[in-house]
Image (cartoon, rainbow, N blue to C red):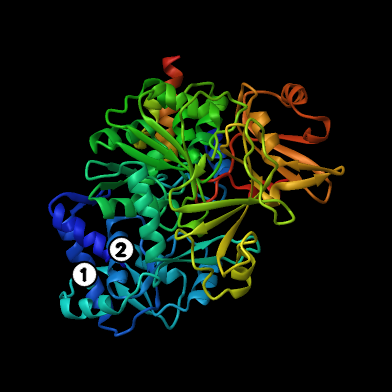
Amino acid sequence: MDELLKILNNVKPGVDFEHEENIMEDEIIDSFDIVTLVSMINDEFDIEITPADLVPENFKSAKTIYNMIERLQNEV
Amino acid sequence: MIKNILQLLENTVELFPNKVAFGDDKREITYVEFLKNSKKIGSCVASKKVTQKPIIIFIDKTVNCLEAMMGVIYSGNFYTILDTKTPVERAKSIIDTLDPIMIITDEKNEKKMSALNIQNIEVLMYEDAVDYKIDEETLKDIRDKQIDTDILYVLFTSGSTGIPKGTVLTHKAVISYTTWVKDTFDINENTIWGSQTPFYFSMSITDVFSTIITGATLYIIPKMYFSFPVKLIEYMNEKKINSIYWVPSALCIVANLGTLKTAEFESLQKILFAGEVMPVKQLNEWIQKLPNAQFANLYGPTETTDICSYYVIDRKFENDESIPMGKHCNNCGLIIVDENGNEILPTKDKESKIGELLVRGSFLASGYYKNPEKTKEAFVQNPINNSYPEIVYRTGDLVKYNKRGELIYISRKDYQIKHMGYRIELGEIERNIYGIDKIVLCACIYDEKEQKIVLFYQGELEIEELAEEANKRLLPYMRPNKYIKVSHMPYNANGKIDRKKLKGEM
């Protein structure tokens, strides 16, 4: 989880991602940022987020992103 | 006689009263309802008994915003749409320039607006205005006095000095331009647009106003969907979107996220793009996905309403070729001049010299609002006409004719640099770098202080590998002095590569 928070803060500094529950709806992360975020997560956690995983439900908060990462890690 | 964009809207309403005009993720509105709400807002504003004055609309990209736009026009005034995410300083600068008589906002955006701390300007709530009684007599009276060179809207661009410039567009310019759009791309009541560009950006004029004049339908695609391509395509299929006019960055995001491999577009037939150079690699992926669709590259600045030249893609392009800007739009004149003001003409089977592109005709803006100096610099007497007054717009863009007589974009005049005594177009370096296989995106910036060509790139290859490939393609004096690998390119609010930010990162 700490690695993920580090990545999120890297993409958008100055946001309290630990307590942010609506990352996309509050437009904290821009549509253009998501490409970066996905490639950074892929590299850090050695997974592949596919277009099918790119759904709003997975990107609501740091926790939902982390759940997705864990799921994808288990699939490998 | 057509002198006002609202006549065309009213005509459409008569033909297709119950057809959906606009939709966002919350609601849809038919033409007859849209007209009614616009007239209500117009009557409410008109009760102030002021015309020909600026009004700011501070509403995000929704149907509400479109109703407010038409409402302002009904009142005989003109609008500027302020991005609801505008930084305070930029908002202040725009408000200072405009000196608006009123700001229209809605409940959703009211809080954001108070954060801007605007004083002494009347605020009108959308919710109140849309509840007002229509005053047909006053609206008719206002229309009677209007002419086609009255302002429709003022659109602010960044301006190289950092002070936003307000480009003045008239009814005449917008009617001329959108008539071209309609005729050229066969926009009609069967067209269903999927709108990507913000309403404070000139590209939105094309899809919004071509909808109004033809009875087409326009769906606002929620910005968030560009992060979630599966959702995006679901939405496009559900709404039966058959035409899009996006910035290349948006098309690239869909391609780069791997969506094109699996997705199926059920209705998409027209893919138009403008705003920056479309990388050929991603374009080819789109064409491969939709081989029967029409693809067109449009070019133009805000000062020509939106577009002045276009090219419908009719042949295959390699990754290191550029997509032409094509030829002038019908009823729009283009002139290329060299440094001495002499005209450059296409020559058969030979590339022409490079020169600056000038535009003339009815698509032109009337100048910059309350900015005579900048207006004088950009809107000048046609250098090849010394017989009568004729204003042309200097685009500041360098172009040439290729062997086929098509216009080719080279770069901004400001991107033309002098390096080690050579004149170099940074755009030409970028085009060559795009020919290298693993390059996803690149941007070339000149560091004047250090006198270095710096290349920012995104892609799965190391600097040494890239430099080696680049050296095979570029003349020695054009080779970048420094390469910087980025995990992603920064984008500005309009979705273009943010070169100012890159420059700051050097």
Q: Residues within 10 Å of mark 2 (few under 14, many from 20)?
A: many
Amino acid beneath label 2: Ile
Q: Nearer the viewer, residue B503 or B147?
A: B147
Instruction: Residue B5: give its label.
Output: 2
Question: Which percent across, then down, holds residue B234?
Answer: 29, 32
**Secondary structure at numbered mark 2:** helix
Instruction: Residue B208: give its label.
Output: none
Q: Which residue is mark 1?
A: B39
Extreme residue in the bottom direction: B49
Foreground: disc 2 or disc 1: 2
Residue A73 shows in this picture: yes
**Residue at screen point 34% across, 53% down:** B179
In the displayed structure, does residue A21 sit left or right of residue B336?
A: left
Residue A31 lies in what quarter of the image? Answer: top left
In the displayed structure, does residue B42 sit left or right of residue A9?
A: left
Amino acid beneath label 1: Lys
Question: Which percent across, then down, holds residue B371?
Answer: 58, 73
Rendered view: B332 above or below B399: below
In the displayed structure, does residue B351 sit left or right of residue A14?
A: right
Instruction: Work out whether mark 2 precedes mark 1 in sequence or the reverse, and give the earlier one.
Output: 2
Rendered view: B244 above or below B330: above
Q: Residues within 10 Å of mark 1 (few under 14, many from 20)?
A: many
**Where, quadrant-wise, is the N terminus of chain B in this rendering?**
bottom left
Residue A65 lies in what quarter of the image? Answer: top left
**Secondary structure at numbered mark 1:** helix
